[in-house]
Structure formats: structure tokens, C-alpha cells
Image (cartoon, coloured by chain):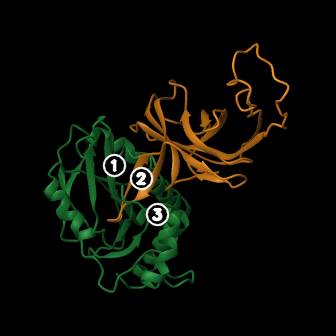
Chain colours: A orange, B green
């Protein structure tokens, strides 16, 4: 099981309140210095299921936790892997059928793991260039509402780790 | 979209309430009905490698065997690979007993799922299978009605093909009765349990 911890310097000059105040040469002695909040993301259990020979779709699953409220707003992989990548959710419709839809933003509550797992949220790899084979690594770039991104290495396997 | 998410948990939690499943290890984990679904009189075309012609496949197991029926499509990235991977894992653990488990996969997306896609797809998950395909949607629906299965294929304004389908797998005996309905999310353990219990029942004289 891979585990990746990333500390992000999430607060920029914009959030410090100086960028929108006028010309860059303008200074102010009234700026209140506050300690920037730093989000820590931890990702574990990242894996992608093997894809059959003729399949053009794949899925990546993982668990992600942030120390701050945030949202997962996108994912991407190299075009060497798949032509398009989206965050999807599998849903059960009122008639009992199951389908999927793209999700623009998956809310993340601070310090609460967000599970992307079979039957729920997943990162959908569309138009796979070649089948996903056991042991391969799929590097997925996750994008958050904060504007930050992080790269997760998902191991291809037949079953969940 | 009408939705209820976190479906695996929901379905599994609600099953005992709806169907009175017992919890000991010799009992089935799938759904059972007092009046089982009867599917043994239904048939659909089975397709083979592209050079071969179709035959008619009837939804019943061979004598002393079980037939597991899935409805899905090959471009399905989440539900179908999950269920079929669980099926594969269950059979691997069963060893030689798995020789008595047959698989029928009915595509709900026949326009895209031609034989040359279905056969390699299913070969990934099973050594013994039947690829079932008809482009006659009324014929497909008539069989789905017997299983109480629904599906749809629609294309949105961007050209994206949206497919929905019932996620349940059906275990059918040689009389053509559905003896266990395996909801999505039951997992390989649940499948292995039911296959083993039902094969034992056959050996004990039940059908």
C-alpha cells in the first residue's frame, strides 16, 4: 500500500490580502500578518484495476484525507495512458439500475477520509491507450478546489490492495 | 439523475431486512424469493469468434452445475469489472469446484459490444463463459423482464454514451430457477459462499 504525504504551502500572496490592494509597488503598514494555514494531504490505497484486452475504460481508486476543508475537482493522467480522465460517481437510480456521471467537485471535510472505491466515486480513465497490466504504475494528478495539485502513483492490480 | 449513492453499503445493509437472510455460514448471502424467478424458458443469441455463427443460448445450468448471469457492457469501468473480478476471485478460491460454475454475460450495449469485443473481455475473467448479444432490443427486454432487470443506452449532446443497468448477478440452476440474486457489492466472499452452498445443495439432492 502506497502512502504519500504532501504538505502544501496553500496560502499565496493573494490570500494574504496584498495582491488586490493596488499597484505592486504600493506598501502598507496596516497589513496584519497571520500564520498561513497549511494543508496536509495524505493518500493511501491508490490502485487501478487491470483492464481487459478490449476495454477502453479504466478506473483508479484511492483514499484521500486533507487537514483542511477542500474539494477534489479534477484528475488527469498522461495521454500515454488515457486520452481523457474524469472524476465520476456510480449511482443507483430510482429504478434500481446503476449508472455513472461526471462529478465536478467532490467535497472533502477536514481530517475525514474521502474514499474513491468501487461502486462510488472513482477516477475514470477514458480511451485507454493500452490495457492496464498488473504491476504498472499509473500516475494521477489530483486537482483540488484550493488550486493545489498532487501526484499519486496508483498500482495496477486485479483486486483492491 | 435520480440517485441513491453509497449503494453497495445500502444494498447490503438492507438485504437482511428485505429478504430475511440468515447469517450462519451455510446460508446464502444473496437474495432469495419464495417464488424464484423462472428464466429457463428464455433464450438469446450466443456469439463466438467473428468467423463463427451464432447459436441460441438458454438460461439454465447444465445438470449438477450452476449458471451465473451478468448484465453489463465492456466499456463499463466500475460496476462490471468489479463484479467480474469478484467472480474470478471466488472461482479461483473454489479450486476444482469452480468447474461446475458457468458464466453468461449479456451485453446491454450490443451496438458497441460486438463479438470481437465481448470474447476477449470475458476471457479476462473466466475460462468458461457465454457471450450473449442481440441487437433486437425488444428481444433483450423480454429476457431482462424475466430477470427483473432494466437497462438503458442513451447518447448525450456531447456524444457521450450513458449506459445504465441493473448490477445484480443471478445464479441459475439446471431447472432454470434463479436460486440466488447477488447484489453489486456482495464481493468475492459472498459469491464464493453462495456458489459453495448451492453446489452442496445439488450434491445433497436439491436442485
Q: Is residue B82 visible?
A: yes
Are discs 2 and 1 less than 8 Å apart at CB? yes
Q: Which mark is residue B80?
A: 2
Front: mark 1 or 3: 1
Of callouts 1 and 3, the N-terminal one: 1
Q: Is residue A132 above or below residue A68?
A: above
Left-right relation of A145 to A21: left
Residue B24: where, in percent of width, then height? Answer: 57, 84
Label 3: element kind: helix
Q: Which mark is residue B98?
A: 3
Who is closer to the viewer here, B180 or B152?
A: B152
Left-right relation of B165 to A52: left
Of callouts 2 and 3, the N-terminal one: 2
Q: Which residue is mark 1?
A: B73
Front: mark 2 or 3: 2
Of callouts 2 and 1, the N-terminal one: 1
Who is closer to the viewer here, A68 or B172?
A: A68
Residue B193: where, in percent of width, then height? Answer: 52, 72
Q: Is residue A84 above or below residue B119?
A: above
Amino acid at each position: 500500500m502506497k502512502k504519500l504525504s504532501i504538505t502544501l504551502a496553500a496560502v499565496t500572496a493573494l490570500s494574504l490580502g496584498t495582491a488586490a490592494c493596488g499597484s505592486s509597488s504600493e506598501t502598507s503598514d496596516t497589513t496584519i500578518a497571520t500564520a498561513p494555514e497549511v494543508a496536509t494531504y495524505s493518500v493511501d490505497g491508490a490502485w487501478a484495476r487491470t483492464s481487459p484486452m478490449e476495454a477502453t475504460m479504466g478506473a483508479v481508486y484511492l483514499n484521500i484525507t486533507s487537514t483542511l476543508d477542500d474539494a477534489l475537482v479534477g484528475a488527469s493522467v498522461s495521454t500515454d495512458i488515457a486520452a481523457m480522465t474524469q472524476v465520476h460517481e456510480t449511482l443507483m437510480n430510482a429504478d434500481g439500475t446503476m449508472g455513472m456521471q461526471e462529478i465536478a467537485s467532490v467535497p472533502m471535510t477536514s481530517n475525514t477520509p474521502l474514499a474513491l472505491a468501487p461502486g462510488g466515486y472513482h477516477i475514470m480513465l477514458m480511451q485507454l491507450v493500452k490495457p492496464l497490466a498488473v504491476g504498472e504504475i499509473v500516475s494521477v494528478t489530483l486537482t483540488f478546489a484550493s488550486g493545489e495539485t498532487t501526484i499519486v502513483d496508483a498500482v495496477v492490480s486485479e483486486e483492491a490492495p | 439523475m435520480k440517485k441513491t449513492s453509497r449503494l453497495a453499503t445500502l444494498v447490503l445493509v438492507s438485504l437482511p431486512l428485505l429478504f430475511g437472510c440468515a447469517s450462519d455460514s451455510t446460508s446464502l448471502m444473496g437474495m432469495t424469493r419464495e417464488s424464484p424467478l423462472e428464466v429457463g424458458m428464455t433464450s438469446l443469441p450466443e456469439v463466438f469468434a467473428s468467423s463463427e455463427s451464432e447459436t441460441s443460448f438458454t438460461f439454465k445450468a447444465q445438470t449438477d452445475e450452476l449458471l451465473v448471469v451478468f448484465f453489463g457492457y465492456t466499456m463499463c469501468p466500475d460496476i462490471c469489472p468489479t463484479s467480474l473480478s469478484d467472480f474470478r476471485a471466488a472461482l479461483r478460491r473454489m479450486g476444482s469446484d469452480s468447474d461446475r460454475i458457468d458464466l453468461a454475460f449479456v451485453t446491454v450495449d450490443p451496438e458497441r459490444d460486438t463479438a470481437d469485443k465481448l470474447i476477449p473481455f470475458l476471457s479476462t475473467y473466466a475460462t468458461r463463459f457465454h457471450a450473449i448479444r442481440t441487437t433486437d432490443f425488444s428481444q433483450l427486454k423480454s429476457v431482462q423482464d424475466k430477470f427483473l432487470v432494466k437497462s438503458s443506452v442513451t447518447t448525450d449532446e456531447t456524444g457521450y454514451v450513458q449506459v445504465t443497468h441493473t448490477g445484480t448477478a443471478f445464479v441459475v440452476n439446471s431447472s432454470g430457477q434463479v436460486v440466488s440474486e447477488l447484489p453489486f457489492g456482495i464481493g468475492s466472499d459472498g459469491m464464493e459462499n453462495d456458489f459453495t452452498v448451492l453446489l452442496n445443495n445439488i450434491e445433497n439432492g436439491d436442485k
